[in-house]
Amino acid sequence: MPLFKVKLDEIATHDMLRKPFVPVMLTEVDDFIVNMVAIEGVDEQARVHPDHDELFIGYKGKATIMIDGKPVPLGEGDTVVVKKGQAHAARAESRAIVLSIKDVRLLLKEKS
Protein backbone atom coordinates (compact mmCIF):
# COMPACT_ATOMS: atom_id res chain seq x y z
CA MET A 1 0.00 0.00 0.00
CA PRO A 2 1.45 3.42 -0.94
CA LEU A 3 2.21 5.96 1.76
CA PHE A 4 -0.13 8.95 1.76
CA LYS A 5 1.34 12.12 3.20
CA VAL A 6 -0.27 15.54 3.65
CA LYS A 7 1.81 18.66 4.32
CA LEU A 8 -0.46 20.86 6.41
CA ASP A 9 1.59 24.04 5.95
CA GLU A 10 1.34 23.72 2.16
CA ILE A 11 -2.42 23.23 2.22
CA ALA A 12 -2.92 26.03 4.76
CA THR A 13 -1.44 28.52 2.26
CA HIS A 14 -2.92 27.00 -0.92
CA ASP A 15 -5.47 28.85 -3.08
CA MET A 16 -8.09 26.16 -2.44
CA LEU A 17 -8.27 27.35 1.17
CA ARG A 18 -8.66 31.00 0.18
CA LYS A 19 -12.43 31.21 0.81
CA PRO A 20 -13.40 31.14 4.51
CA PHE A 21 -15.76 28.47 5.82
CA VAL A 22 -15.29 26.15 2.82
CA PRO A 23 -13.66 22.94 4.08
CA VAL A 24 -10.97 21.14 2.10
CA MET A 25 -10.96 17.39 2.63
CA LEU A 26 -7.44 16.19 3.47
CA THR A 27 -8.02 12.45 3.89
CA GLU A 28 -10.25 9.69 5.22
CA VAL A 29 -9.36 7.47 8.16
CA ASP A 30 -11.70 4.50 8.48
CA ASP A 31 -15.16 6.12 8.78
CA PHE A 32 -13.84 9.62 9.48
CA ILE A 33 -12.91 12.54 7.26
CA VAL A 34 -10.25 15.10 8.11
CA ASN A 35 -10.90 18.60 6.77
CA MET A 36 -8.96 21.84 6.88
CA VAL A 37 -10.95 25.06 6.88
CA ALA A 38 -10.10 28.75 7.04
CA ILE A 39 -12.10 30.72 9.61
CA GLU A 40 -12.35 34.47 9.08
CA GLY A 41 -15.22 36.67 10.20
CA VAL A 42 -18.43 35.09 11.46
CA ASP A 43 -20.09 31.96 10.15
CA GLU A 44 -23.77 32.84 10.49
CA GLN A 45 -24.99 29.31 9.80
CA ALA A 46 -25.06 27.20 12.96
CA ARG A 47 -24.96 23.45 12.34
CA VAL A 48 -26.35 20.58 14.35
CA HIS A 49 -25.34 16.95 13.83
CA PRO A 50 -28.01 14.90 15.62
CA ASP A 51 -26.14 11.59 15.42
CA HIS A 52 -22.41 12.41 15.44
CA ASP A 53 -19.75 14.34 17.34
CA GLU A 54 -17.22 16.61 15.61
CA LEU A 55 -13.65 17.37 16.71
CA PHE A 56 -11.97 20.72 15.97
CA ILE A 57 -8.21 21.23 16.27
CA GLY A 58 -6.68 24.70 16.16
CA TYR A 59 -3.82 24.75 13.66
CA LYS A 60 -2.97 28.42 12.97
CA GLY A 61 -4.31 31.55 14.61
CA LYS A 62 -7.19 31.90 17.06
CA ALA A 63 -10.85 31.09 16.46
CA THR A 64 -13.95 30.75 18.58
CA ILE A 65 -16.35 27.86 18.29
CA MET A 66 -19.82 28.84 19.41
CA ILE A 67 -21.45 25.79 21.01
CA ASP A 68 -25.11 26.18 21.93
CA GLY A 69 -24.55 29.94 21.92
CA LYS A 70 -21.54 29.83 24.25
CA PRO A 71 -18.06 30.88 23.02
CA VAL A 72 -15.28 28.32 23.31
CA PRO A 73 -11.81 29.67 22.38
CA LEU A 74 -9.74 27.55 19.99
CA GLY A 75 -6.06 28.42 19.74
CA GLU A 76 -3.14 26.68 18.07
CA GLY A 77 -2.92 23.13 19.39
CA ASP A 78 -6.27 23.32 21.21
CA THR A 79 -9.04 20.78 20.65
CA VAL A 80 -12.77 21.20 21.06
CA VAL A 81 -15.34 18.43 20.79
CA VAL A 82 -18.86 19.34 19.73
CA LYS A 83 -21.15 16.59 20.96
CA LYS A 84 -24.00 15.29 18.84
CA GLY A 85 -27.05 17.52 19.01
CA GLN A 86 -25.14 20.70 19.91
CA ALA A 87 -25.56 23.73 17.65
CA HIS A 88 -22.18 25.10 16.60
CA ALA A 89 -20.64 27.78 14.40
CA ALA A 90 -17.21 29.39 14.14
CA ARG A 91 -15.78 32.87 14.08
CA ALA A 92 -12.37 34.56 14.05
CA GLU A 93 -11.36 38.22 14.11
CA SER A 94 -8.39 37.43 11.85
CA ARG A 95 -7.75 34.40 9.67
CA ALA A 96 -7.40 31.10 11.52
CA ILE A 97 -6.88 27.60 10.16
CA VAL A 98 -8.73 24.73 11.82
CA LEU A 99 -8.78 20.97 11.31
CA SER A 100 -12.09 19.17 11.69
CA ILE A 101 -12.61 15.45 12.11
CA LYS A 102 -16.07 14.00 11.69
CA ASP A 103 -17.91 10.87 10.68
CA VAL A 104 -17.99 10.42 6.91
CA ARG A 105 -21.78 9.91 7.13
CA LEU A 106 -22.07 13.62 7.96
CA LEU A 107 -20.50 14.46 4.61
CA LEU A 108 -23.01 12.23 2.85
CA LYS A 109 -25.93 13.89 4.70
CA GLU A 110 -24.61 17.40 3.94
CA LYS A 111 -24.46 16.60 0.21
CA SER A 112 -28.00 15.19 0.06
Image (cartoon, rainbow, N blue to C red):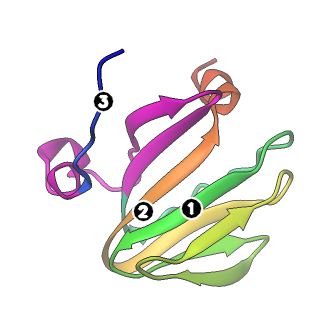
Q: Residue at x 38, y 45 (%)?
A: 22
Q: Spatial distance from mark 1 to mark 2, Cα to Cα?
A: 7 Å
Using the image as rendered, state which of residue 34 and residue 38 is in the foreground: 34
Which circle marks residue 98 in the picture? 2
**Which amino acid type is marked by label 2?**
Val
Using the image as rendered, state which of residue 108 and residue 77 is in the foreground: 77
Compared to residue 72, the image places residue 101 above or below, namely: above
How packed mark 2 is, by other alpha carbons closer than 10 Å (few <14, some 14-19, many 20 or more), is many
Residue 63 relative to residue 72: left or right = left
The residue labelled by disc 3 is 4
Q: Spatial distance from mark 1 to mark 3, Cα to Cα?
A: 22 Å
How packed mark 1 is, by other alpha carbons closer than 10 Å (few <14, some 14-19, many 20 or more), is many
Dot 1 or dot 3: first in sequence order is 3
Report the span colored magenta: 9-37
Tag nearer the camera, 1 or 3:
3
The residue labelled by disc 1 is 56
